Image (cartoon, grey):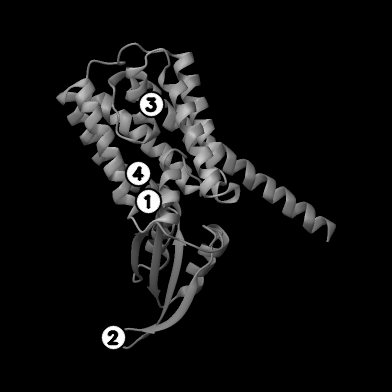
Amino acid sequence: MIEEKLHLSKSQLRDSAIFFALLNSGLFCTAAGIAFFKTPNHFAFGGTSGISIILATLFPTWNVGGFMWLVNAILVVLGLIFLGARAMGWTIYSSFALSFFVSLCQKVLPLTRPLTDDTFLELCFAVILPAVGSAIVFNVGASTGGTDIVAMILHKYTSLEIGRALMVSDFGIVLIAAYLYGAKTGLYCILGLILKCTVVDNAIESLNLRKVCTVVTSDPERIEDFIVKVLNRSATEQKAFGAYTHDDKRMLMTVLTRHEAAMLRNFIRTADPHAFITIVNSSEIIGKGFRSI
């Protein structure tokens, strides 16, 4: 009993350490995109970073990192009032950690102008870095804070569609950016706003991507052994028969990573050349060995 508890506590400690490391790496990646690419180019796509970029222009005594501390602090207070501490969860930490990482990046490498003269290249990194960072954070079940708090409040107290409300607010920030920085920057901000949503969704799917493999074979034993003993996975087996030949078959279904799926495919080519294999992508795998419910 004691050994089981020790093993469980070690496992929980390891899982917590991985969660914390992934959370902070995602937040730092987001902060790097804001500090090194969004801010110097005045790419105000929306959210707290967009608001802070505009405020830093209107009130140059503070930088973007400083305004992010202020804006996030106001949003956290609103979240605590309307949602409560329990509902906020890791959002409180994420809000202030992101502000800290932005301030750190601006302290280590202060930029008065963009890194390159290629505005579109800067836009790509301004979109990709925060999108990948947000995807990592969302994938571990947390959020980057900021306007997510507004979304949570709207979801609780109104029937307003959150996605539409946030899109409207982000578009409003883009219009202000276009007024302050000119039509060219405004158009880049609109493009960045559109790309941001697409890249975040694709990044999340890529992080979770798994291969669902279905194998129809008349000699399942060797394939089962390979899946269980070599790949250290399991599989679901059921009886099947050919519609044309009416021969008895076995159908195996298993979920693997990209590398494991390639190993299984190569093994089956030699172990059972007559086997029928289908391999499809899935980004929502819930169960033991993958994501918990």
* Mark 2 surroundings within 10 Å by alpha-carbon count, few (fewer than 14), some (14 through 19), many (20 or more): few
Q: Nearer the viewer, mark 4 or mark 2?
A: 4
Q: Which mark is drawn over residue 200?
A: 4
Q: Which residue is at a point 47% across and 37% down the rendered structure image?
A: 75
Gap in angstroms between the C-alphas marked 2 and 1: 35 Å
Q: Earlier in the sequence, mark 4 or mark 2?
A: 4
**What residue does disc 1 label?**
205
Q: Nearer the viewer, mark 3 or mark 1?
A: 3
Residue at the outermost bottom position: 246
Q: Nearer the viewer, mark 1 or mark 4?
A: 4
Three-letter code for the amino acid on which mark 2 is drawn:
Ala
Answer left or right for 5 relative to 52. right
Answer left or right for 289 relative to 217. right
**What residue does disc 3 label?**
52
Q: Earlier in the sequence, mark 3 or mark 4?
A: 3
Describe the element under mark 4 as helix, strand or loop: helix
Q: Position of residue 66 (x, y in %)?
A: 47, 21
Q: Position of residue 293 (x, y in %)?
A: 53, 62
